[in-house]
Amino acid sequence: MSRVFGIRLYSLRTNKTNYTQTQMAKLLRLERSTYTKYESGITEPSLQTLRNIKKVLNITYDELLSEELSETEIIDYSLFRKTV
């Protein structure tokens, strides 16, 4: 789940809310570095954190946990990684 989840999370955050990673971390009551690790695919969130992400982004679990990425999600994430 990690890599796909991270790309999806990045895409949802930037396309649905325009929140920064810092803003998302605050809303989820996490350290920014912890949230960044989710988007980077380094670690996976707990079930409670998944629930909170779902609420903050106002999405379904299917939207959050789907294993298939769209071409747009992949391109957006690739462009983002080049700027970091």
Image (cartoon, rainbow, N blue to C red):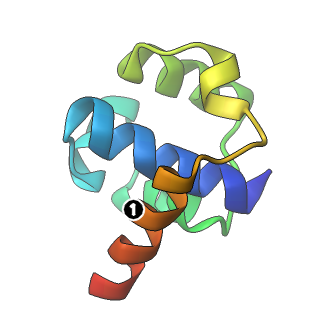
9 and 34: which one is in front?
9
**In the visual, does 19 lie left or right of 66?**
left
Picture quarter with the C terminus: bottom left
Q: Which residue is mark 1?
A: 76
Query: Of helix, strand and loop, which one carries label 1?
Result: helix
Question: Residue most toward the front?
Answer: 71
Please provide percent x and percent y for residue 32.
35, 58
Please provide percent x and percent y for residue 11.
43, 47
Please provide percent x and percent y for residue 57.
39, 23
Using the rendered image of the protein, determine whether residue 84 is visible from the camera's viewpoint.
no
Q: Residue at x 59, y 46 (%)?
A: 70
Q: Residue at x 66, y 18 (%)?
A: 61
**In the visual, does 46 lie left or right of 7?**
right
In the figure, 79 relative to 55: above or below? below
The amino acid type of the residue labelled 1 equals Asp
Quarter of the image where one finds residue 56: top left
